[in-house]
Image (tube, rainbow, N blue to C red):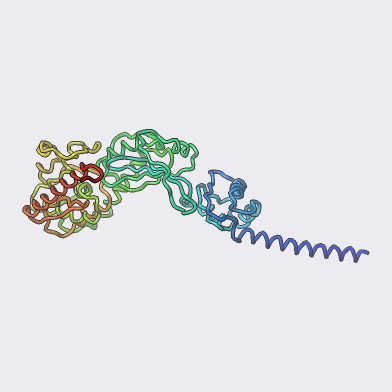
Amino acid sequence: MWRSVASNALTLFIVLLIAAAGLLAWGRHQYSGPGPLSAAVCVKVDRGATLSQVSQNLAAKGAISDARIFRIGADYSGKAKGLKYGSYLVPAGASMAEIVDLLTAGGASTCGREVNYRIGVAKAEIVLRETDPATNSLVEVVKFDPAGEVPAVYTEAKEAGDLRWQITLAEGVTSWQVVNALKQADFLSGEVAEVPAEGSLAPDAYDVDANEDRGSLLAKMQAKQKAIIEELWPLRAEGLPYDTPEEAMVMASIVEKETGIAAERPMVASVFVNRLREGMKLQTDPTVIYGITKGEGVLGRGLRASELRRATPYNTYLIEGLPPGPIANPGRLSIEATLHPASSDYLYFVADGTGGHVFAKTLAEHNQNVAKWREIEAQQREQQNAPEGGGN
């Protein structure tokens, strides 16, 4: 009898071992095999979220087949406590193992919504975008002037808290424009004691946190601009007509305001370098405009003859050499162009009607180019004033 009992017990034990092995193999397959998602989804991991909460969210979205297996697998791999806060794009067919790796790797969020506050020369605007899981690309939700009416969709997104924040400074913005725009940013905190020195802020994109201090952010922008000039100044070309990094930044700001085409900047810089070497006045309109506006906003019209004759420290039609300081915050490319200007004999340039400029070596040639530009301006005005539709 005891032999029969022992034999049956052994048989049962073997059956249980086989079943356990089969269950383990099935669990491993469920954890490492392709997942059930037919299309990518965005998954958010809240700050302080537990593995249980995350697994239930994944199961509810159809990203995993079994929340328990997900938790066991994550624990077995030693990653159960490594969840990183953020929003993540889980691709179609992702296995549980791949999802665990995705949620514990850290780094920038790959999904969800982001706010980019673009501070430009002419205007500042807030752009709310969100990830389209189907294409893994950001799609614009709303764009608005922060000084105007705030859209409800932005307010709702801000209250939900699942946002990434970025501030982008355009090349050529003035320090006053930057400070004025930052004061309007409702996602920042803190006061600004004073407007930073003109030219001291680096145009770039800055990742920020909600409620980040405005003063600290400005300090970060200043540190970046300082690092750029300290890197580039020792590598400058020989024989430049400016002796200090400060003078180079003045020239870089002028180059920045004269052309928005990166490829033209070395040539524009060469014109001003040649003028300085020849003892000519710089005669550049952007400096005159800065003398009028002091960088506080945009003039919004052409210069008047009386303004070209008005004596200010920035009127380069009247003063010799460089003005006393930068007229904007130049970007890295303009600084590089200033420190490595093209080799040319050009002393003049004027707009060519395509967004670029045409250059000249002599005043006679320049006057011809100016006459052509006046013709282009006249044609453009006629086209703007022409009535819509055709006629006989």
Give residue 60's position: percent from left, percent from top.
61, 48
Give residue 270's position: percent from left, percent from top.
16, 55
362 and 211: which is toward the camera: 362
Q: In the image, 157: left or right of 174?
A: right
Give residue 363's position: percent from left, percent from top.
7, 52
Q: Farthest residue in the front direction?
A: 392
Residue 32, picture quadrant: bottom right
* Rendered-image quadrant of the N terminus: bottom right
Give residue 345's position: percent from left, percent from top.
11, 58
Q: Residue at x 22, y 50 (%)?
A: 259
Q: In the image, 349: left or right of 72?
A: left
270 and 233: which is toward the camera: 270
314 and 196: which is toward the camera: 314
Vertical position of residue 39 compared to residue 130: above or below: below
| Residue 63 at least partly seen | yes
| Residue 208 at least partly seen | no
Vertical position of residue 19 compared to residue 149: above or below: below
